[in-house]
């Protein structure tokens, strides 16, 4: 009996320690989010601080005050207009990757690709390659010091972050002021166009400071998670070459791939991409197994009960996207990369409402999810049709989850350009040790 009592006391103590740890985690997450918001804002900015989000880059969470405005930015018509621009940015990046005689760091280059897409497509800025390199370097300094302790001393992370923010805002202000001069010949409205026009329609006009900070928020929203998912996509295709071959078969079956190249007479359109069902399954499986963001928190709007535990109104509740995907009973063999689980025949994700939520769930789900998945689909199509690539290390690297999912070494991969006959333009190096796909 004494032994049973001891076990009970130990169990209660363990439970109490877990509850305290979770409470501390939520509290720290909230404080980090408030710190991030403060660090990115000018003292004179009047924009409200969003609540109910960990501050990770989910469009529609960090920018929830812009939800109605940016619904236009991610409409079907808008995505159709972005498509050729996104494809061009991806093609240019893959050409650069393939021309590099050395293996590239996929995660870092995916960050550069995501940044370029946000600046040139989402915001419509026309900047030179040199300016783009400088802005990307500055933005990386800004992001790397985002969660520094708020101690404003020389050489501190906080000081570096503030300095990077100020430099970034100067270059963004220059791009915004030049933007009206670049409107001639433009065939679509980007996010910044919609923001400025909507403000005028409502009888207000955003100050330059508010425009600069909204711009940084948009870049941040499209940056980390897209780079993470892009890296995971490439790593999954390397691990599973049979998946890549099935993608090529689907492209050939749809008339999009001929003699190993995208058919120039067959324009890549949004409806064509949406019709690629196996491609859709692959992207969904990448986002299930390698969800970029671990989770988020919400505020309980009313008291409710979950598994016998009462959650009072006003409490902050943290939910884990990754744990949900790992423990959801609807998914069979959860550790396996199996795109067919999302096929029409199996449809494992359709068996419950909140078992699959890579972009969050409910009314506060990610507003930019359609743009993100479109970007990943175009990247997969270009990878399947224009590139050969191989792992440049003996083993696949370990994957870590903070701040977003990414390989510890960034994933070292050698890319080869292809000619019209699918022959490699660059000669292979004997030092490369992975399997080519």
Image (cartoon, helix red, strand yellow):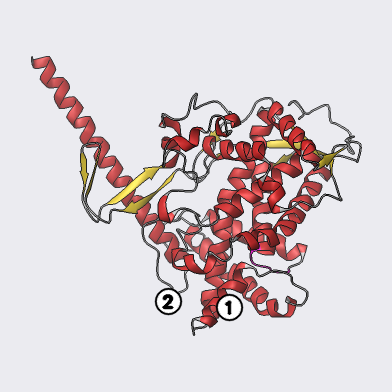
Tell whether 54 sits left or right of 272.
Answer: left
Circles 1 and 2: CB atoms closer than 8 Å: no
Q: Residue at x 70, y 78 (%)?
A: 178
Say how many tags the image has. 2
| Eye-nearest disc, 1 or 2 | 1
Q: Residue at x 81, y 48 (%)?
A: 95
N-terminal-most mark, 1 or 2: 2
Q: What is the residue that sits farthest to the left in this orientation?
A: 1
Location of residue 255 in the rendering, given as x and y in whole percent from the top left corner: 81, 41
Q: Residue 69 or 225: which is nearer the viewer? A: 69
Query: Which sits in the foreground, 357 or 406?
Result: 357
In the figure, is residue 5 to the left or right of 204? left
Q: Is residue 411 visible?
A: no
Q: Is residue 96 left or right of residue 399?
A: right
Q: Residue 316 or 391: which is nearer the viewer? A: 316
Residue at horizontal 13 percent and vertical 21 percent from the top? 6
Q: Is residue 218 magenta?
A: no
Chief secondary structure of the magenta portion: loop
Residue at image x 42%, y 66%? 38
Q: Is residue 177 visible?
A: yes
Magenta segment range?
Answer: 122-126
Q: Which residue is mark 2?
A: 46
Q: Where does residue 256 sit, x and y in percent of width and height?
A: 80, 43
Q: Quick one: SS at disc 1?
A: helix
Residue found at the very far bottom of the displayed protein: 203
The part of the image, by quadrant, that contains residue 127 is bottom right
Q: Is residue 204 left or right of residue 408?
A: left
Q: Position of residue 238 (x, y in %)?
A: 69, 31
Q: How far apart are labels 1 and 2 at the CA level?
A: 19 Å
User: Does residue 402 sit above or below 127 in this rendering?
Assistant: above
Residue 265 screen position, x and y as percent: 86, 51
Q: Which residue is mark 1?
A: 197
């Amino acid at each position: 009996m004494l032994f049973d009592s001891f076990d009970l006391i130990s169990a209660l103590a363990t439970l109490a320690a877990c509850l305290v740890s979770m409470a501390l985690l939520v509290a720290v997450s909230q404080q980090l989010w408030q710190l991030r918001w403060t660090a990115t804002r000018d003292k004179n900015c009047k924009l409200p601080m969003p609540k109910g989000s960990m501050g990770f880059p989910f469009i529609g969470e960090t920018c929830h005050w812009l939800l109605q405005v940016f619904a236009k930015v991610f409409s079907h018509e808008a995505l159709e207009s972005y498509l050729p621009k996104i494809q061009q940015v991806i093609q240019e990046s893959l050409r650069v990757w393939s021309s590099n005689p050395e293996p590239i760091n996929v995660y870092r280059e995916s960050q550069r690709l995501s940044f370029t897409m946000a600046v040139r497509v989402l915001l419509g800025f026309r900047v030179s390659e040199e300016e783009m390199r400088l802005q990307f370097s500055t933005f990386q300094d800004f992001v790397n010091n985002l969660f520094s302790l708020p101690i404003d001393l020389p050489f501190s992370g906080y000081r570096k972050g503030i300095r990077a923010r100020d430099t970034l805002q100067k270059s963004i202000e220059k791009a915004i002021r030049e933007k009206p001069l670049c409107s001639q010949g433009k065939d679509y409205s980007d996010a910044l166009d919609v923001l400025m026009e909507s403000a005028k329609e409502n009888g207000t006009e955003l100050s330059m400071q508010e425009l600069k900070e909204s711009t940084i928020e948009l870049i941040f929203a499209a940056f980390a998670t897209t780079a993470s998912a892009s890296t995971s996509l490439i790593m999954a295709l390397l691990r599973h070459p049979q998946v890549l071959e099935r993608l090529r078969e689907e492209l050939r079956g749809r008339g999009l791939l001929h003699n190993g190249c995208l058919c120039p007479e067959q324009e890549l359109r949004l409806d064509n991409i949406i019709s690629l069902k196996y491609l859709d399954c692959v992207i969904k499986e990448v986002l299930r197994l390698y969800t970029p963001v671990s989770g988020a928190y919400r505020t309980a709007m009313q008291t409710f009960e979950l598994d016998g535990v009462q959650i009072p109104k006003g409490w902050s509740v943290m939910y884990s996207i990754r744990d949900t995907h790992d423990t959801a009973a609807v998914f069979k063999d959860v550790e396996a990369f199996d795109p067919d689980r999302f096929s029409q025949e199996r449809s494992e994700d359709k068996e419950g409402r909140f078992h699959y939520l890579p972009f969050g769930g409910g009314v506060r789900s990610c507003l930019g999810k359609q743009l993100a998945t479109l970007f990943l689909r175009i990247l997969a199509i270009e990878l399947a049709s224009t590139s050969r690539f191989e792992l440049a290390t003996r083993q696949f690297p370990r994957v870590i989850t903070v701040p977003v999912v990414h390989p510890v070494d960034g994933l070292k991969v050698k890319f080869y350009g292809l000619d019209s006959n699918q022959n490699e333009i660059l000669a292979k190096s004997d030092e490369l040790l992975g399997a080519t796909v």
